Structures are given as C-alpha cells and as structure tokens.
Image: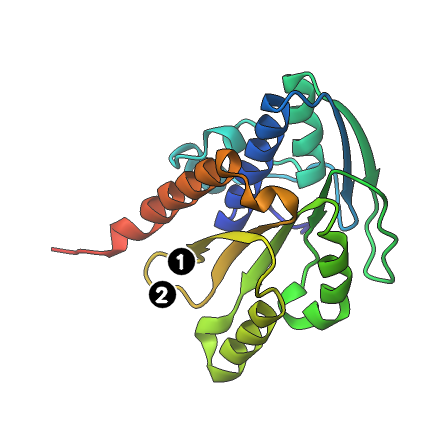
Amino acid sequence: MRYEPGNWGDILKGEWLCQWLEWKLSGGGRQLRYQDPFCGWPEYPVTESTRRRVLNSPARRYAGYLGLSSASLVARHARSLGLQLESHLSDRETALDLKPCDLLLFDPYDFFERWLEWNDLLLEASHDRDIVVYLYNKSPRGVSQFRQYQALRERWKGRPLVLGRVPADSVLPRAWHEVWLVGPSAAQAGLVGPLRETSLQLHRHISEPGVFEG
C-alpha cells in the first residue's frame, strides 16, 4: 500500500507551508518559485480514522488538503491566495540539482540517518532562500540517536533556524516530528510568531489527553 498522509508530522508541515505562503502574500509578493526534490505522488488515499484525527485537530488549513502531497498542497493553497507559482518537482534519492527558488521543501524519507550527505548543501542554499525541512527525530530512542541529533543541530548553530516539534505519540513518544524553517525569513517575527502558535496548539492537542487519567 502506498504511503498514507495525515500523521502529526504531515499536519505540522502542511500548516507551516500554508502559513509561509500567507506570509509571502502579506509582504506583497505575487510570484513564487518553489522546489520539492522528493515530491512523491500528487495524492494519496486516506483512511476514515486518519480523516477523523485531522478534522478533530486544530489544523484547519491542512484539513482542507488532506490526502494531497506537500507539492500539491502548496500548489492549491498558492492558487487560492492568488499567487503565481513556478514549481520544480522531482522524486529522487540521488544527487540533487537545486534550482533558484524562494521556497525549498526538503523532505526525504530518511534525513535523520543521511543528513551528512545533504547538510552542507542545505547550509549553503539557506543563504538565499527559505527552506522547510521535515525531520523524524529519533533521539528519544537511545544515546546514539540523541548524539546524532546533537551533531546535526551543532552544524546549524548560529544560523537562522526555527523549529516546531510535536510528539509522534501522545502516551509513548519514541520520536518527535520536527519541521524546521531555515533561511532569511527565519528571523521575521511576523512569520515566526504564527508558526510558534501553530506548533504549540498541535503539541497541546496531541499531548494533553495523556497527561492525566482518572
């Protein structure tokens, strides 16, 4: 069966992408160049349990695009805002050909294990574009995973970076879903504030049911 969208990482990532597009529009921009080198299928099947989870969450933007890939979500939300979108899409795990763009989504399947292959490329690219990175952070699983995560974060020290983090599970979070925004806009309060609030709302929604039982 093909991948089913709608996990908490997809939700957080989708909300952030929509908010970035809205922030872009608020600054007067109408032209947008977008690249997604790991774009996958345009659309995926969704189970009823996933649909209920998303509709019951505070993710109002993402709920309107449930079942779509990130590239399809960006295209549709940009169109709804009146943005003119130029997309560079591919689906590869080999050498990357980064195009000049305003927004790069970097969401390979296994960034946590393979970040050394790509990190210097992202560090360089983040000088002149915004990059949204999805990371399935496995650091809660043990010392070696935690050290790997520490090494990754050390490479970004001193660079503009904001991240949202939500647990993969409300009762036994053996991993975290993380979405990073790196690049020039990571220092813009008008964008960072809404991203922070979205992350907090989702974190509370996921975590609070497991806080107390009686």
Q: Secondary structure at mark 2?
A: loop
Task: Indicate the amino acid at tag 1.
Answer: Asp
Q: Residue furthest bottom?
A: 143
- Where does label 1 land, which residue? 169
Residue sitting at 36 percent across and 41 percent down?
201
- Where does label 2 land, which residue? 172
Considering only vertical position in the picture, is 38 above or below 158? above
Q: Secondary structure at mark 1?
A: loop
Residue sitting at 65 percent across and 48 percent down?
183
Q: Tell whether 181 sits left or right of 8.
A: right
Which part of the image, by quadrant, shows the C terminus? Answer: bottom left
- Residue 144: horizontal and vertical position, in percent? 53, 83
| Nearer to the camera, 209 or 85 | 85
Q: Tell whether 125 sits left or right of 151.
A: right
- Residue 195: horizontal and vertical position, in percent? 48, 40
Tag 1 near tag 2, CB within 8 Å: yes
Give the CA distance from mark 1 to mark 2: 6 Å
| Nearer to the camera, 24 or 204 | 24
- Residue 109: horizontal and vertical position, in percent? 68, 59
Residue sitting at 53 percent across and 77 percent down?
145
| Nearer to the camera, 29 or 87 | 29
Task: Indicate the amino acid at tag 2.
Answer: Leu
Q: Tell whether 130 sits left or right of 212.
A: right
Considering only vertical position in the picture, is 93 above or below 35? below
Neighbour tally class for label 2: few under 14, some 14-19, many 20 plus, Cα within 10 Å: few
Considering only vertical position in the picture, is 81 above or below 180? above
